[in-house]
Amino acid sequence: MYLREGRFFFALILRYSVVYMGAYLPTSIINKYSRFIGKIAYIIDQLNGKKVAKNLKHLFPEKDTKQIQNLAKETIQQLCLADFENTLIEKLIAEGYYKKDNVVGLNNLNAALKKGKGIILVISHFGPHLQVIPALGFRGHTVNQVSNKLYESNNSQSKVGFFEKLYRSSSLKNNGRYLPVKMIKVGTYMRPLFDHLRNNEIVIAAIDGKTGGKTLYFKLLGCKSYPFSTGPFSLAYKTGAAIVPSFTVRGKDDSISIILEKEIVIDRNSTDKEAEIVKCTSSFVTLLEKYLTKFPDHCGRHFLGRQASVIFSQQKYDKQPVVDK
């Protein structure tokens, strides 16, 4: 616990010193600067570097040691890029940074909106996943995000240390303060979600976050089991909202593309509600596997979370029943 708190303490120092130095840099070279910091972070923080490499090997057992090490470095750089963008969000918005984002599949979004029952935009912590908020919000869509209740002070979160809570909550505050989004905390009344969907708005929910519903375990590439929440699909079953999967990828030139996939249709007339929800969750997991395979350096958020060290070493989840896709 104390070791973990110490790491988050130094992470806060890094964020509020090195990162804010970027506020004085031209937007055109911020990405190069953050990649440089990512290389340094990989060298200095060998604990996380080794963890990322170990977990990448679990996910991609076919890759050799050199490939895994290079991939781990790229993964850390991707995380630094995302952290810079989040911390300097006010500057980037003012300079029109997010207007350059390319949105692929707007026809899928528009087709779902025509149904008039709202959209549940299902994401995972893959790549710069929060970029979808400004990409859609600054294009005139009303966007709401289901957020983690990690930042609330309650007994269930007593194991979260002060510096970790401060580090993670600073990201959430930046999102809610500067981005065109309304944050909806998990654990509050569900009525706001129903109201937003009834108004034909967009609700963003992470399937690998704490978004309510049951937790199911699926095989994910080389990993024996990985937990996913059924919350978004349960909500769609109740409300009739359309499920639209979304993935955000960063190109080699640091360009951002938000990809809106075709709607995952949930059959509300099915006599087996649970089976229908499992089927739709499985469809998203299959999509995620496709993106993880194509962009393996985009999955750092999975590997540096609170449970990353146990998820892929299978110390906790290998005894869980795995859903057959």
Image (cartoon, helix red, strand yellow):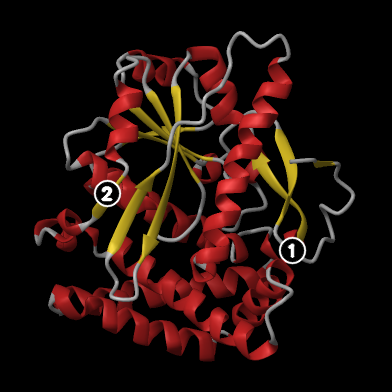
Other-residue count near label 2 (Cα within 10 Å), few / some / many at <14 / 14–19 / ≥20: some
- The residue tagged with tag 2: helix, strand or loop? strand
Kind of residue at disc 2: Val
61 lies above or below 46: above
Judged left or right of residue 177, residue 268 is: right
Image quarter of the C terminus: top right
- The residue tagged with tag 1: helix, strand or loop? loop
Question: Residue 306 location, x and y as percent?
Answer: 64, 59
Kind of residue at disc 1: Gly
Tell me which residue sits at (61%, 65%) in the image. 303
Tell me which residue sits at (15%, 76%) in the image. 28
Question: Residue 10 location, x and y as percent?
Answer: 48, 77
Other-residue count near label 1 (Cα within 10 Å), few / some / many at <14 / 14–19 / ≥20: some
Tag on residue 103?
A: 2
Question: Residue 199 location, x and y as percent?
Answer: 30, 15
Q: Name the image quarter holding residue 32.
A: bottom left
Image quarter of the N terminus: bottom right
34 lies above or below 219: below
Tell me which residue sits at (37%, 15%) in the image. 117
Question: Residue 156 location, x and y as percent?
Answer: 67, 40
175 lies above or below 26: above
Tag on residue 280?
A: none
Q: Name the image quarter holding residue 85.
A: bottom left
Residue 114 visible somewhere in the drawing? yes
Which residue lies under the disc numbered 1? Answer: 222
